[in-house]
Amino acid sequence: MIFSVVWLFVFLIVDIFQCTPIKKAWRPTIEGYCVNTYSWWLGYAISSVIIDAIILSLPLPMLWGLQLKPMRKALITILFICGYW
């Protein structure tokens, strides 16, 4: 959870300071420079999916350690994965 919150604040700060000067983010006619937003958002999306996959996989070892039939373990795992969507 701490990692996810830190990750959110880092991307929020980068989003605020994506342009030099900062006003250029909402006034594109001002002279200055902005980072490539496509690459920035792509990095944001990829890292978001990775963090979500890590969070989703945290309860799985405990689940697989339960004394259940393999079919039930598979169904409960699928239930966890469906909860992601």
Image (spheres, rainbow, N blue to C red):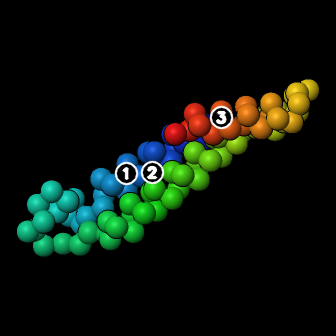
Reading the chain from its start, which is encountered first: label 2 or label 3? 2
Question: Is there a contact, CB below 8 Å, between mark 2 and mark 1?
Answer: yes
Of 30 and 77, the residue lying toward us: 77
* Residue 39, quarter of the rendered image: bottom left
- Give the secondary structure at mark 1: helix
Q: Residue at x 65, y 34 (%)?
A: 80
- Give the secondary structure at mark 2: helix
Of 35 and 37, the residue lying toward us: 37
Residue 23 x/y as whole percent: 16, 58
Q: Amino acid at mark 2?
A: Val
Q: What residue is disc 3 on?
A: 80
Q: Amino acid at mark 3?
A: Phe
- In this view, the mark in front (1 or 3): 3
Q: What residue is disc 1 on?
A: 13
Reading the chain from its start, which is encountered first: label 1 or label 3? 1
Q: What residue is disc 2 on?
A: 10
Left or right, 66 with reference to 25: right
Q: Residue at x 68, y 38 (%)?
A: 78
